[in-house]
Amino acid sequence: MTMTTYEMARVLEQLEESPEKIMFGKLLNELGNQSGERIQSAAKQVPLHLLRDIVFQFQQVIESRKGEQVEELAKQLADQGISAEELEKFLNR
């Protein structure tokens, strides 16, 4: 029995810190370290409907994690003594 990417993602999500989830994360991380050419070459071997599902899942994660980068930037600015108001004033020049 094969699982769709969505079904696999839901199962892995339920397992939180399972070895499978950790290994899947490492696999994705390693994929991100590959060249665009290698990623595209590998993606050509995946059926189009599965690629669309994978892209959709990644877009969902990106949307949900946008705030992380904003928080990190705010912390870095605060550590440097720059307030949000000062940054806004500078950007509005």
Image (tube, grey):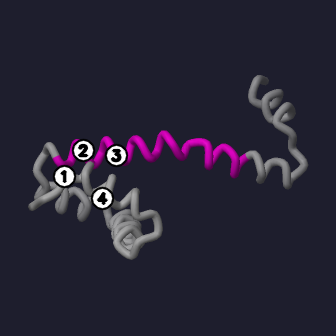
Numbered disc 1: secondary structure: loop
Neighbour class for label 2 at 10 Å: few (<14), some, many (≥20)? some
Give amino acid for label 3: Gln
In front of the other: 72 or 34? 72
**Residue 35, quarter of the rendered image:** bottom left
Q: State the separation of the CA atoms marked 2 and 4.
A: 19 Å
Which mark is in front, 2 or 4? 2
Q: Quadrant of the C terminus?
A: top right
Residue at (90, 49) in percent of width and height? 81
Could you tell me if residue 33 is visible in this image?
no
- Tell whether label 2 touches label 3 (CB within 8 Å): yes
On the image, which quarter does residue 84 sit in?
top right
In reply to whether residue 1 is colored magenta, the answer given is no
Q: Describe the element under mark 2 as helix, strand or loop.
A: helix
Identify the residue shown where x is 40% and y is 67%: 25
- Check disc 4 and report the residue beneath it: 36
- Give the spatial CA distance, label 3 vs label 2: 6 Å
- Give the magenta part as a residue range: 50-73
Residue farthest to the right, as pictured: 81
C-alpha span from label 2 to label 1: 9 Å
